[in-house]
Image (spheres, grey):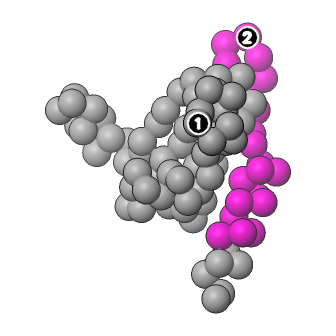
């Protein structure tokens, strides 16, 4: 646990790999709101087991960082469309 804490502090990121929405009790992908429950102060990125979907929290959306999936032997993949939709939803929620 201490090693994980040190790694999170060093890179300012909580990163998870391999979730499968079909095995989650909700049978859906984690949302920004779900991941905000883990941390509102540190960016949280959760990669789907397929490698094609990234779920992120609010801090990751507004951090200004670009997140790219890099798999050996394949070109980098950016989940720009999904991130753009989530960022628009987040910005709209801040206007209320």
- Residue 8 visible in this rendered orientation of the protein: yes
Q: Are marks 2 and 1 in contact (CB under 8 Å)?
A: no
Mark 1, secondary structure of its residue: loop
- Residue 57 visible in this rendered orientation of the protein: no
Residue at the (73%, 11%) spot, across then down: 73
The image shows residue 30 at horizontal and vertical percentages of 61, 45
* Quarter occupied by the N terminus: top left
The image shows residue 67 at horizontal and vertical percentages of 62, 43
Residues in magenta?
Answer: 70-90
In the rendered view, does 53 fall on the left or right side of 37? right
Sort mark 1 into few (<14), some (14-19) or many (20+) by Cα contacts within 10 Å: few
Please name whichever residue, 85 or 62, is drawn nearer the observer in this view of the structure. Answer: 85
The image shows residue 77 at horizontal and vertical percentages of 76, 32
Mark found first going from the N terminus, 2 or 1: 1
- Going by the picture, which residue comes out furthest to the left? 2
Asked if residue 21 is positioned above or below residue 11 in the image, the reply reads: above
Q: Nearer the viewer, mark 2 or mark 1?
A: 1
In the rendered view, does 90 fall on the left or right side of 58? right
Q: Determine the CA span between mark 2 and mark 1.
A: 33 Å
Residue holding disc 2: 73
Residue at the (27%, 32%) spot, across then down: 4
Asked if residue 79 is positioned above or below residue 64 in the image, the reply reads: above
* Quarter occupied by the C terminus: bottom right
Magenta residue check for 30: no
User: In the rendering, which numbered label is found on residue 25?
Assistant: 1
- Going by the picture, which residue comes out furthest to the bottom? 96
Residue at the (65%, 78%) spot, across then down: 93
Magenta residue check for 86: yes
Mark 2, secondary structure of its residue: loop
Asked if residue 59 is positioned above or below residue 20 in the image, the reply reads: below
- Where is residue 8, by image quadrant? top left
The image shows residue 62 at horizontal and vertical percentages of 57, 65
């Amino acid at each position: 646990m201490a090693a994980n804490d040190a790694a999170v502090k060093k890179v300012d990121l909580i990163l998870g790999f391999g979730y499968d929405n079909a095995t989650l009790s909700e049978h859906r992908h984690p949302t920004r709101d779900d991941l905000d429950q883990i941390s509102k102060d540190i960016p949280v990125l959760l990669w789907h087991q397929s490698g094609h979907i990234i779920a992120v929290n609010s801090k990751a959306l507004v951090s200004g960082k670009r997140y790219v999936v890099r798999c050996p032997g394949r070109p980098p993949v950016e989940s720009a469309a999904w991130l753009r939709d989530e960022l628009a939803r987040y910005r709209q929620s801040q206007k209320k």
